[in-house]
Every structure is written in C-alpha cells, then in structure tokens.
C-alpha cells in the first residue's frame, strides 16, 4: 500500500502557495500583472558584453510558470494519492466487515 507522507503534502501545498502568492492576474485575460513593467518598462533588462539585452523579468516569469505547473502537478499527485489511500482504506473496512467475528 502506497502512502504519501505528510511531508509530501506539506511540500506540495507550500509550493502551490508560493506559486500563487503575489501573482496577481488580470480578471479578463488571466495574464499575470506586472506593476514594475508598467512603471518602468526597461527595469530588469541587463546587457551582456555585446550589448544584447536579456530580460530578467521574462526569465523570472518563465520560472514562475514552471513553479506554478509543478505546484499543480504536485497537488494533483497528492489528490490522487489521497484518493487511492481512501479507496484502500474503504476496501480494507469492507473486507473486515465481511469476515466473521469471533464472539
């Protein structure tokens, strides 16, 4: 019988909370809002030796999306594990109920 430890549940919920905290989304589009970009569009841009610019914000956004996806997958895994554990417990109880008891 597979049992998901409570530390796995706590970890999955913590990752999900971190992915969602501070991530305000536009109600109409679902896009993450970026107040810094609105105030200063070039904030977070860094130039390399050749003068090419790489947006740290884009990298952070991509990392945030990966964290959000991992959190979703973690929550789904915990849900499946909890559901499977519940089914196994139910089967065990039903099996126990079917067995004759000694007086």
Image (cartoon, rainbow, N blue to C red):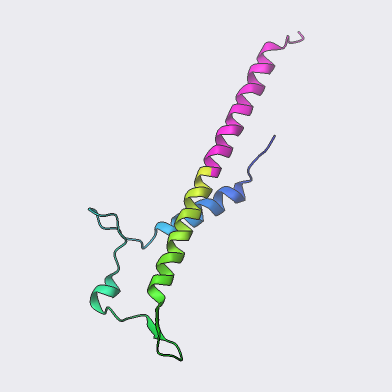
Q: Is residue 91 magenta?
A: yes
**x 73%, y 10%: residue:** 101
Q: Position of residue 20 (x, y in %)?
A: 40, 57
Picture quadrant of residue 94? top right
* Residue 98 seen anywhere in this rendered image of the structure: yes
Q: Position of residue 55 (x, y in %)?
A: 38, 77
**x 44%, y 90%: residue:** 50
Q: Position of residue 4 (x, y in %)?
A: 63, 43
Q: Is residue 7 magenta?
A: no
Q: Is residue 10 left or right of residue 59?
A: right
Pick the front one: 58 or 27: 58
Quarter of the C terminus within the rendering: top right
Q: Position of residue 40 (x, y in %)?
A: 26, 80
Pick the front one: 61 or 17: 61
Q: Vertically, is 65 above or below 102?
A: below
Q: Vertically, is 62 above or below 52?
A: above
What is the magenta segment's predominant secondary structure?
helix
**x 67%, y 38%: residue:** 2
Q: Is residue 57 left or right of residue 8?
A: left
**x 43%, y 60%: residue:** 65
**Label total for image:** 0
Quarter of the N terminus within the rendering: top right
Residue range in magenta is 77-103
């Amino acid at each position: 019988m597979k049992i998901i430890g409570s530390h796995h549940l706590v970890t999955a919920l913590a990752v999900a909370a971190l992915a969602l905290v501070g991530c305000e989304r536009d109600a109409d589009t679902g896009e993450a809002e970026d107040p810094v970009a609105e105030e200063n569009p070039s904030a977070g841009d860094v130039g390399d030796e050749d003068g090419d610019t790489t947006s740290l914000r884009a990298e952070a956004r991509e990392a945030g999306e990966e964290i959000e996806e991992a959190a979703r997958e973690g929550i789904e895994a915990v849900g499946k594990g909890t559901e499977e554990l519940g089914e196994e417990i139910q089967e065990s109880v039903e099996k126990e109920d079917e067995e004759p008891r000694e007086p």
